[in-house]
């Protein structure tokens, strides 16, 4: 039996299709980067005009709504979703860690969440 003469032509295409190269993530519609998304989350109270002390019960819902509306980065959306299933103090610690990775010196939302344990993001 003679080998197929097309095999040398098809083999490179087949091997490249089977490679384990990581899939590139699509950029956010507005071109928002992950560090920009984290910065927006950290500064949500100022940007949204919220006073966590005035309405500690619904501030988490207002924060969540504003972030949902303004964070466009796929990784930022994923972070918000992961944060929303944790308690406020855990959210603060996780957000602080991501802010540090993103190169932010401080994160006001993480400070607030860790300080009083209220106002966490909701699903």
Image: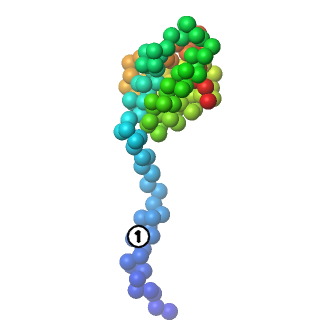
Which residue is more in the foreground, 103 or 32? 32
Q: Residue 96's spot in the image, x, y percent? A: 48, 21
The colour style of the image is rainbow
Q: Give the residue drawn at x 44%, y 37%.
A: 73
Q: Residue furthest top?
A: 54
Please indicate, yes or no, whether residue 20 appears anywhere in the rendered image. Answer: yes
- Local crowd size for mark 1, using a 10 Å CA cut-off: few (<14), some (14–19), many (≥20): few
Residue, disc 1 = 13
Q: Secondary structure at mark 1?
A: helix
Q: Quadrant of the C terminus?
A: top right
Q: Residue 82's spot in the image, x, y percent? A: 57, 32
Left or right: where 116 falls relative to 66: right
Q: Give the residue drawn at x 51%, y 10%.
A: 51
Left or right: where 1 falls relative to 103: right
Q: Residue 69's spot in the image, x, y percent? A: 48, 31
Please indicate, yes or no, whether residue 89 appears anywhere in the rendered image. Answer: no
| Residue 115 location, quadrant | top right
């Amino acid at each position: 039996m003679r080998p197929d003469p097309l095999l040398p032509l098809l083999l490179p295409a087949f091997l490249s299709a089977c490679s384990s190269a990581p899939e590139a993530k699509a950029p956010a519609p507005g071109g928002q980067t992950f560090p920009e998304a984290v910065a927006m989350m950290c500064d949500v109270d100022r940007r949204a005009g919220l006073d966590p002390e005035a309405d500690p019960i619904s501030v988490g819902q207002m924060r969540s709504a504003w972030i949902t509306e303004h964070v466009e980065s796929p990784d930022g959306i994923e972070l918000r979703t992961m944060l929303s299933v944790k308690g406020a103090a855990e959210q603060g610690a996780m957000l602080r860690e991501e802010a540090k990775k993103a190169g932010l010196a401080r994160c006001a939302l993480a400070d607030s969440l860790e300080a009083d344990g209220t106002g966490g993001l909701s699903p």
